[in-house]
Image: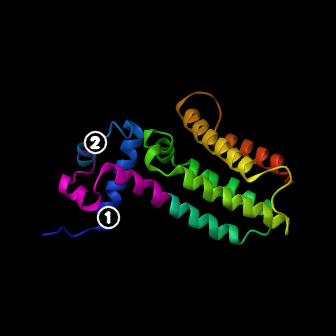
């Protein structure tokens, strides 16, 4: 007989797994660890997920879909490039940076399961369309090819994630707000957007 699914149990598996993957690493976390952390049986875990790989994919994909749908909705109402950049830097980047367990997963050995390249393409498309909207009829932004924009977004995104992770685990004396302020300054300067 098939077990009945309970969304609260599924969410508990995701939350516990996220913390375990973040603290122990994806490779070093076993299904037995998840069983111990959740207090659920192995059978219950497998009712919701076929494997540990499927769990990490669900953590990243569901978190991404939730964040990106909110970004898209907010960007649809952005008046101009500056307002769009302000939303990305002042609202959504800080939200992402509060989720240190997710940052650790994105930067860990679980990167093979997170389809990061798809997420980079989606964000590149979003920023590219934002820049094009500021210059109707233009094929791009002066001096910035799509590849350069994509490269810049990867460098900034991965650099910011690593900077936040290191800053929170050390005594460097910088805060997440300092990092966001720097990203804001660099984004506006590199895209020629006035504050």
Q: Is residue 163 left or right of residue 27?
A: right
Residue 63 visible in the shown view? yes
Q: Position of residue 168 (x, y in %)?
A: 55, 35
Q: Is residue 81 above or below residue 114?
A: below
Q: Which residue is mark 1?
A: 8
Magenta portion: prevailing SS class: helix
Category of crowding for the residue at label 2, using alpha-carbon neighbours closer than 10 angstroms: few (below 14), some (14–19), many (at least 20): some
Kindly indicate the quadrant of the structure image that contains residue 91: bottom right
At horizontal 43% and vertical 49% (from top left) the residue drawn is 113
Q: Magenta residues, as a range?
A: 36-63
Disc 2 + disc 1, Cβ < 8 Å: no
Is disc 1 placed on a helix, strand or loop?
helix
Q: Quadrant of the N terminus?
A: bottom left
Is disc 2 placed on a helix, strand or loop?
loop
Q: Position of residue 89 (x, y in %)?
A: 69, 53
Residue 129 inside the magenta-drawn segment: no
At horizontal 39% and vertical 38% (from top left) the residue drawn is 25
Q: Earlier in the sequence, mark 2 or mark 1?
A: 1
Q: Position of residue 145 (x, y in %)?
A: 77, 51
Kindly indicate the quadrant of the structure image that contains residue 121: bottom right
């Amino acid at each position: 007989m098939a077990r009945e699914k309970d969304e609260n149990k599924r969410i508990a598996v995701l939350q516990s797994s996220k913390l375990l993957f973040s603290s122990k690493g994806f490779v070093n976390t076993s299904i037995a660890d998840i069983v111990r952390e959740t207090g659920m049986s192995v059978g219950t875990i497998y009712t919701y997920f076929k494997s540990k790989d499927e769990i990490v994919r669900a953590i990243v994909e569901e978190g991404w879909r939730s964040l990106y749908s909110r970004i898209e909705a907010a960007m649809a109402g952005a008046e101009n490039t500056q307002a769009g950049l302000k939303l990305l830097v002042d609202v959504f980047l800080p939200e992402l940076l509060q989720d240190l367990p997710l940052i650790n997963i994105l930067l860990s050995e679980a990167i093979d399961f997170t389809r990061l390249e798809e997420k980079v393409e989606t964000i590149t498309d979003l920023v590219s369309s934002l820049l094009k909207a500021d210059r109707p009829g233009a094929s791009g932004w002066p001096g910035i090819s799509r590849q350069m924009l994509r490269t810049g977004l990867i460098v900034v995104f991965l650099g910011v994630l690593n900077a936040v992770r290191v800053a929170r685990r050390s005594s460097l004396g910088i805060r997440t707000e300092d990092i966001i302020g720097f990203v804001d300054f660099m984004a506006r300067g590199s895209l020629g957007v006035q504050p």
